[in-house]
Image: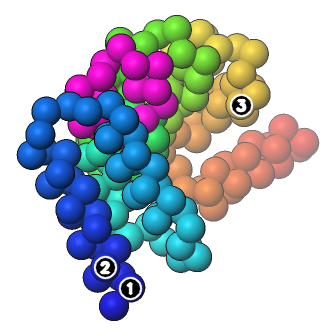
């Protein structure tokens, strides 16, 4: 019952957004309400409908208010949710939008890394590899740049964690002989 009420509320929010012209404060409050609803839940898995609705709200806000300081953060959140729901193409589009339009944001390195991960999740290893390389080149001081370089140097892109570990262990064994 509670889930149905939450879903109906989320649907009402999306409908209300599309019924009128842009209203900054209204859109922000709708985003906050849905975020609160999602993040106050003690579920470990994101409800797909609510996740899609939140992505829609974030994207609508970004379309209506592209110059608002909150826009890049909302787009990043939308990309993160999209990736977590395995909607990699949407995540790639959103992250490219940030990189191309908001290149002064403080988390630009995170955007490049997340973009590479989305390409990898989409089994596009060529673009993943190129984006990881670009990430390391542009953000060498980023906390995960050195780990990313190790992944690149050892050809670990596209491998499962088990395959990565086996490859590293095999390389270590062969250098100790």
- The mark lying in front, picked from 3 and 2, is 2
Residue 3 higher or lower than 141, as above or below: below
Front-most of 68 and 52? 68
Residue lying at 83% horizontally and 48% vertically, measured from the top left: 173
Q: Residues within 10 Å of mark 1 (few under 14, many from 20)?
A: few
**Mark-to-mark CA distance, 3 and 2:** 41 Å
Q: Nearer the viewer, residue 33 or 108?
A: 33
Inspect this view and state whether residue 121 appears: no
Q: Is residue 71 magenta?
A: yes
Which span of residues is magenta-colored? 58-74
The residue under label 2 is: 5
Regarding mark 3 in the picture, which secondary structure is present there? loop
Residue reaching furthest right?
Answer: 176
Residue position marked by numbered label 1 in the rendering: 2
Residue found at x 19% / y 45%? 17
Image color mode = rainbow
């Amino acid at each position: 019952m509670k889930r149905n009420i939450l879903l109906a509320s989320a649907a009402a929010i999306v409908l209300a957004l599309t019924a009128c012209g842009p209203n900054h404060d209204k859109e922000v409050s709708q985003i906050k309400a849905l975020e609160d609803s999602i993040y106050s839940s003690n579920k470990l898995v994101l409800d797909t409908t609510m996740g899609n609705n939140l992505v829609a709200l974030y994207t609508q806000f970004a379309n209506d208010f592209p110059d608002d300081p909150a826009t890049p953060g909302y787009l990043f959140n939308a990309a993160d949710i999209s990736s977590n729901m395995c909607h990699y193409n949407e995540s790639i589009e959103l992250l490219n939008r940030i990189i191309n339009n908001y290149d002064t944001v403080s988390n630009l390195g995170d955007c490049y890394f997340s973009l590479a991960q989305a390409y990898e999740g989409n089994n596009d290893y060529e673009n993943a590899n190129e984006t990881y390389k670009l990430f390391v080149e542009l953000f060498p001081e980023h906390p995960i740049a050195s780990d990313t370089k190790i992944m690149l140097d050892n050809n670990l892109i596209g491998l499962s964690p088990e395959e990565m570990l086996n490859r590293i262990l095999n390389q270590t064994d062969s250098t100790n002989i």
